[in-house]
Amino acid sequence: MTITAPTAPNITEPSLYLDGIPHERFAEIRNTDGLMWHDYHDGGFWVVGRHADVKTVSKNGTVFSSAVGMTNLWDLEADAIEARRSLIDTDAPDHTRLRRLVARAFTPKNIRLWEDTVRDITVDLLEAFIAKGEGDWVEEVAAPLPIRVILTMLGVPVEDAGYLVELSNFLVEGTGETQSIPADAFGNTTDLRLLPFNSPASHALFEYGEKIGDLRRQNPQDDLVTSLVQAEAEDGDRLSGSEYRNLFHLLIFAGNETTRTALAHGAMALADHPDQWQRVLDDPAMIDSAVEEVLRWSTPVLHMRRTTTERVELGGTQLEAGEKVVIWYASANRDETVFDDPFTFDVGRVDNPHFSFGGGGPHLCLGAFLARLEIQILLEEMAKRNIHLTRTGEPVRAPSNFVHGVLSVDMAVEARS
C-alpha cells in the first residue's frame, strides 16, 4: 500500500511518555488536515486524534472493528488472536453475548450497593496516610484503593492485593520497551506472543483466576467470581474456560490500573492547582464536575486500535477495508475545538465530553460507574477532613504508550482545622 498522507510525529515510543503525554505532537496531528500516517514495526497505522473522529470510530463498531486484528498496535498471528481475545477484542454478536453475561454487576444501581465498602476502604487508607503525614501517594492510596474494591467485589482475598498490583505493574511493562522479568517468570511455559501484554504476568493472572474460579464452583459465594462461573444466558450459553480467564484478567487489570492512574494524576493536579481544590472545599457540590475533570486530565488509557471492515471516509481521508486506525484518547481529551482552555485543570468545567471510558459506543468501559464512585468518594472524604496535598517529589511515570501510568509520586498531607 502506497501512502501519500503526511507522516505523523512519533507517538509510539514508550520513553516519550516518561515526561508525560507529548501534547505538542498530538496538537500537530489534530491541526493537520485529514488523517496522518504513522510508521510502525509492521507497516503502520492511521492516527485518529481529533475528538469528532475518535467519537465516530468509537460509535461505529461495525465499520471500525475491535475483533479484526484486535485492539493492540501491532498485528498478531491467528493463534495469538484467539488465545488473547477478551471482551474488548470482540464485535457483536460475540461482544453482546459476553457483555450481557457480566454487565449486570456493573450497572449504576448495583455499583451503588458497594458505596459503603468503597467508603470504608477509602477512609482506612486516608487516615493511615494522614497519620504518616507523607509518603508515596500511589503506594499508600491510589494503588490499594481500587484493587481492594475490585477484589472485594470479585470475592478474592484482599490480602492478595499486593501480589495482584505487582502483576499489573508487570503487565504495564509489557507495553514498554523492556521487561524486568524473564519469559519463564511465575512458572510460565507459554510463548509470550500468546499472552496478553506479551507478559509472563498474564500466565500468573490466568492461573490465579482459574484457582479462584475452581474454588467458587465447589463452594459458591455471593461474589462476582461466582456470578462469572455460574453466568448463564437465557439460551443456556455460558462462559468458556478461555473466556472466563481472559475476562478475569481484564477485570483485575482494568479495575485496578486505570482507576489508580486517575487517582494518581488527580492528586497531583489538586496539589499543583490548590486554587481548584479550594473551589471544591468551598462548594462540595462541585465534586461531580471535579471527578469528570480528573478523568479528562488523567486519560488513563491513551489509545485503542480498530480495523476498517469496509471502504469509509474518516476525518477527510479515504480508507479502504482492512486498514488499521488507532484512536488516541490522549489527543481527543485536549481538542481545542471541543474543550475551552483544554490545558487548564478546571474542576468546574461544565461541558466535558471526555473520552476516558472508551469513547462511548459498544465498548463503553464496564467499570465506568465504579471508577467514578471511587474518585467521588475519595474527594468527598478528603474534603470532609480538609486535606491539602503537596507534592514533595517528581512522579515516576510508566514508560508506556498505552497506560498513562504513574508508578510513584511523593506527597505530603495536611489536615487543616
Image (cartoon, grey):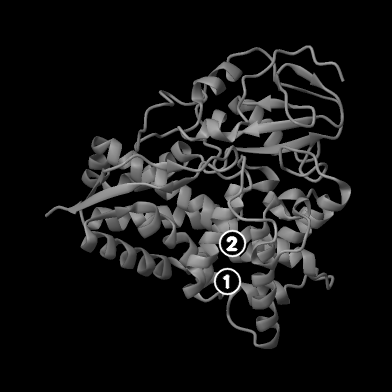
Q: Amino acid at mark 2?
A: Ile
Would you identify the image quadrant in which residue 203 lies?
bottom right
Residue 413 as seen in the image, left or right of residue 46: left
- The disc at residue 353 is none
* Screen quadrant of the N terminus: top right
Q: Which residue sits at x=56%, y=28%? A: 331
Compared with 97, 318 (above or below) is: above
- Evaluate if marks 2 and 1 touch, with contact meaning CB atoms under 8 Å apart: yes
Closer-to-camera residue (228/272): 272
**Label 2 CA crowd tier, 10 Å (few <14, some 14–19, many 20+):** many
Residue at (74% x, 55% y) in the render: 195
SS under mark 2:
helix
Which residue position holds label 2?
Answer: 252
Label 2 to label 1: alpha-carbon separation: 9 Å
Instruction: Please tell me which of labels 2 and 1 falls first in the chain.
Output: 1
Element type at marker 1? helix
Residue 350 point in image, percent of width and height: 41, 34
Considering depth in this image, is 272 or 88 the residue closer to the camera?
272
| Residue 367, visible in the rendered structure | no
Q: Which mark is residue 154?
A: 1
**x and y, in percent, of residue 32 in the image:** 62, 13
x and y, in percent, of residue 259 in the image:
49, 52
